[in-house]
Image (cartoon, rainbow, N blue to C red):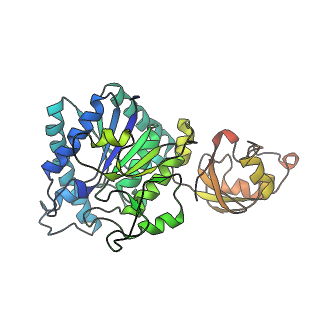
Amino acid sequence: MDRKRIVVKIGSSSLTNAKGEIDKVRLMDHVQAIAELKKYGHEVLLVSSGAVAAGFKQLGYPSRPITVKGKQAAAAIGQSLLIQTYHALFSIYDIIPAQILLTRTDFSKKERYKNAYATFEELLDRSMLPIINENDTVSVSELTFGDNDMLSALVSGLVHADQLIILTDINGLYDANPSKNPEAKRIDRLTEVTEEMLGFADGVGSKVGTGGMESKLLAARAALNAGVKVFIGNGNGANKLVDIVEGRGDGTYVEHDALAFLTNNKQWIALTEVSGKIFIDKGAETALLLNGKSLLPAGIYKFEGEFEHGDVVEVYGTNGLIGRGEVLYSSQELETSMGKRTDELTKYPIEVIHRDKWLKMQTN
């Protein structure tokens, strides 16, 4: 088996019992499986939910809190309980965990993104096990990931993972809601994530966590755009992760053979939040998609949002979103330059988006 870099995401429903307590038996099953992966020489990063679910009982809540302050207080208690438990269980296998708490800003700001990458590389070089969660205690609604499914996709792209494994209590994606339709059939392999597939997944999820199957497919789409293969499903026993990596997992594989390795800068472009939208004509679309050219002001007829030099924007062609890129213009500069030919530009760069800072997106 080739050595791989693998991100494993475990949701709250797979870590806690119905009362919100950490279930050490279920947790130990995951720990054993991760230890087995590392025994085969794989590099592993763990994105772990469970902080809020583990902490709300300590606060006296009868169930998972719904207020921001309640969630953040529960996370402040639960995160320490969770990492203490991980340390105790992984020590059995001489594995040292390293806790990393992230916010959206760590992905949207290029310098923080690079710093996070460097930290992960150092930990992995020294055979540590990074355990990642959202910094719920300080996050505000505008800066959250929505759920740890998307966080796991962003982390997998950041570290150039070979595979993202999203463990859940449902064994993959079905063509209908299996809890409502006994005739529902599982989809074993996908090469893209379409709107129709998101419709299949709507409403399928756990009461303990925040992310249902729809959020897992959205995360899979983001990971694919970052060049990472994805598995969504479940399993039991020490060999469950090894089985998944070897193609024998109980769930849905989301992957295709055309995945390309992206540079760190293009990974950041793929994963960061966008600041605006640019709309281009057919000629500019052809130049970008088929001819490997940069985007020039002449091909732009409209834009939305406010952005600065170095921000990332989405680019829309004749049939919708085609990609995103890092702009060399502010929105104010583009206002006076769009539609103009190169020989009409006097004080601004020739390219609005250079081809080296452009990324075609899979959006179907």
Nearest the camera: 59 or 215? 215
Residue drawn at x 18%, y 28% as measured from the top left: 94
On the rendered image, what quadrant is the N terminus found in?
top left
On the rendered image, what quadrant is the C terminus found in?
bottom right
Nearest the camera: 89 or 122? 89
Say above or below: 247 vs 167: above
Nearest the camera: 230 or 341? 230
Outermost residue to the bottom: 180
Residue 54 locus on image (x, y percent): 18, 56
Residue drawn at x 31%, y 70% as measured from the top left: 179
Residue 114 locus on image (x, y percent): 47, 36
Residue 363 locus on image (x, y percent): 58, 57
Outermost residue to the top: 126
Quadrant of the image occupied by residue 357: top right
Q: Would residue 108 be seen by someone viewing this image from the given angle?
A: no
Quadrant of the image occupied by residue 36: top left
